[in-house]
Image (cartoon, rainbow, N blue to C red):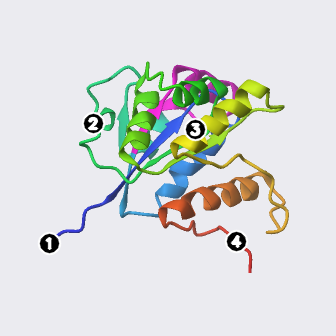
Amino acid sequence: MTEQKKRIIIGITGASGVIMGCRLLEVMKEFPQVETHLVLTNSALITLQNETEVTIDRLLSLADITYDIDDFTAAIASGSFITDGMIVLPCSMKTLAGIANGFSDNLLLRAADVCLKEGRPLVLSPREAPLSLIHLKNLLACKEAGAVIVPPILTFYKGASTVDEQIIAHLGTILRRFGLTPRDYKPWK
């Protein structure tokens, strides 16, 4: 009997730091047992062009399956399509607000809503500073609904001194929630 691949949904929003979502997809290539399902917000495409030299075609090629943000017939819009959870990296405050309030007006929000309602892991990596009271309330609402909140925090104790080492440290923290440890991740000894 063939073992079923893990399915992880990757959501990338227009928050600053879209390179972290790109690196997540690159790192996921280390795990052939994982099938990645990518959905990008329209703002993510704009931020990708403004913050990186990564092309849209390159980003899309990193995922196993990609979806249009407005495709509510996509597999990931249904709880009957079994996944192992979802990562939103980076997570904009707009997306956070949508998730916190069940306002599923695009596929990324719907996929997150499905993960929460089905009790599947939902990891949000919010990217904003400073945080307003509204942001904090939305973070709390998501946490109370079952999401795991993993902001991109600098990690000095692991010896990460470059931006990419910081990103890998962050990705390791996220992916270990799914039983995956990136090759270059340095856990605390």
Q: Nearer the viewer, mark 4 or mark 3?
A: 3
Going 54% across and 61% down the picture, which residue do you hit?
Answer: 177
SS of the residue at dot 1? loop
Q: Say left or right for 129 vs 174.
A: right
Q: Give, as a single range, the part of the protein colored magenta.
A: 37-56
SS of the residue at dot 2? helix
Q: Position of residue 14 (x, y in %)?
A: 62, 26
**Mark 2–mark 4 distance (CA, rounded to whole Å):** 35 Å
Circle nearer the N terminus (4, 3): 3
* Type of amino acid under label 1: Met
Image quarter hosting the C terminus: bottom right
Q: Say left or right for 72 vs 167.
A: left
Residue to which mark 1 is pinned? 1
SS of the residue at dot 4? loop
* Residue 75 tag number: 2
Residue to which mark 4 is pinned? 186
Q: Nearer the viewer, residue 56 or 108?
A: 108
Residue to which mark 3 is pinned? 142
